[in-house]
Image: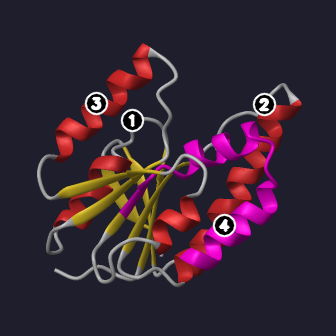
Amino acid sequence: MTIPPLTLVLGGARSGKSRHAERLVEATPAPWTYIATAQAFDAEMRERIALHRDRRGTGWRTVDAPLDLAAAISAAPPGGAVLVDCLTLWLTNVMLADRDVGAESERLTAVCREAPGPLVLVGNEVGLGIVPDNALARRFRDAAGRLHQDLAAAADRVVFMVAGLPMQVK
């Protein structure tokens, strides 16, 4: 099976987006690259990361890229499918590191357009709820919305996950 050059998979928490993205990538020839953006700052997050790794099984090469996601995508083996999980954790890392969110997002979007093989991006849709009550959360929500819009415009396919069901948006 072939997948388009750039796929964006969005959805809420526990919507099935990671599993769906993994299935898309696993439908292509192995080996596959999983670029992880999470950082294990506590026991609960370490457990989440371990569950994701165990679920993936063989055929996957994991690259940790909590901040320099663009470089990790550029360094992926040519032609092999790459899964990035997840954009919103990466955005959190960028914001907490006091990096220029706009510049980092533009750089990421440009690299995604030129990825060396099929690329599947996973992100949490955070804009469907109420307006957050603090400035940092509002800034994050707005930055995530802009990032997702830019990547959706560049993507060949966009999927929105609801209760484990993929809805093709583009």
- Give how far across and how far down residue 128 sits, in percent: 64, 43
The span shown in magenta is 83-111
Is 26 in front, or is 111? 111
Identify the residue at image location x=37%, y=49%: 17
Q: Residue furthest right?
A: 135
Q: What kind of residue is marked 4?
A: Gln
Residue position marked by numbered label 2 in the rendering: 132
Is 166 in front, or is 62? 62
Residue position marked by numbered label 4 in the rendering: 149
Eye-nearest disc, 3 or 4: 3
Question: In the shown orientation, is residue 145 left or right of residue 41?
Answer: right
Q: Secondary structure at mark 3?
A: helix
Label pair 4/1, CB-CB below 8 angstroms: no
Q: What kind of residue is marked 3?
A: Ala
Residue position marked by numbered label 1 in the rendering: 14
Q: What kind of residue is marked 2?
A: Pro
Callout 3 environment at 10 Å: few (<14), some (14 to 19), or many (20+)? few
Q: CA distance from mark 4 to mark 1?
A: 21 Å
- Give how far across and how far down residue 46 sits, in percent: 38, 24
- Give how far across and how far down residue 143 sits, in percent: 75, 52
| Magenta run includes residue 103 | yes
The label on residue 50 is 3
The label on residue 6 is none
Q: Which of the two labelled residues, at mark 1 and mark 3, occupies the earlier sequence position?
A: 1
Identify the residue at image location x=43%, y=24%: 45
Residue 154 higher or lower than 12, as above or below: below
Q: CA distance from mark 3 to mark 4?
A: 30 Å
Identify the residue at image location x=25%, y=39%: 53
| Magenta run includes residue 67 | no
Callout 4 environment at 10 Å: few (<14), some (14 to 19), or many (20+)? few
Eye-nearest disc, 2 or 3: 3
